[in-house]
Image (cartoon, rainbow, N blue to C red):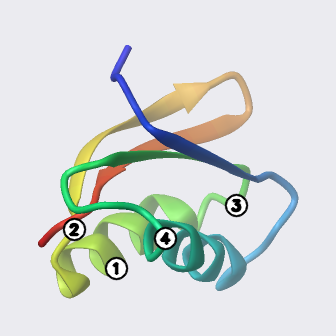
Amino acid sequence: MTEYQGEIDCSGMNCPMPVLKTKLKIDTMAAGQILRVVATDPGACNDMPAWANRVGHTLVSSGEEGDKFIFYIQKGE
């Protein structure tokens, strides 16, 4: 399990809401901190890594827990 400093649950939200909610939350965090994101939209599996890479954050890990997709994103500088 990855250690994290913040968490948001985007269950039931469809694209682009998981990415938008993630951006709003990660903007309040310090560089280097890790945010745990829970989503149910399969589109998030492509959207989260692409967004994180584009804006300079790091996708530390991702996976599935039951019917949920879990992402750990480390805020960049």
According to the image, label 1 marks what residue? 51
Tag in front: 3 or 4: 4
Question: Which residue is denoted by mark 3 in the rendering?
Answer: 41
If you read the primary sequence from the N terminus, does the residue marked by circle 1 or circle 4 appear first? 4
33 w.r.t. 28: above or below: above
Disc 3 residue type (three-letter): Asp
Three-letter amino acid code of the residue under disc 1 = Trp
Which one is in front in this view, the residue at disc 2 or the one at disc 4?
A: 4
The kind of secondary structure element at disc 2 is loop
Q: From the viewer's perspective, is 74 left or right of 1?
A: left
Q: Is residue 28 left or right of residue 4?
A: right
Q: Are marks 3 and 4 in contact (CB under 8 Å)?
A: no
Q: Residue at x 17, y 67 (%)?
A: 76
- List x then y, in percent, for residue 31: 22, 62
The nearer-to-camera label among 1 and 4 is: 4
Q: Which residue is mark 4?
A: 28
* Residue visible at 21% across and 85% down in the picture: 54
Residue 14 x/y as whole percent:
77, 74
Question: Measuring 29% from the left and 72% from the top, which residue is drawn there?
Answer: 52
- Measure how far apart labels 2 and 4 are at the Cα level: 14 Å
Q: Where in the figure is residue 63, as x and y percent of width and height? A: 44, 33
Question: Mark 2–mark 1 contact, CB under 8 Å?
Answer: yes
Name the N-terminal-most of marks 2 and 3.
3
Q: Which residue is mark 2?
A: 57
- Residue 34, located in which quarter of the rendered image? top left
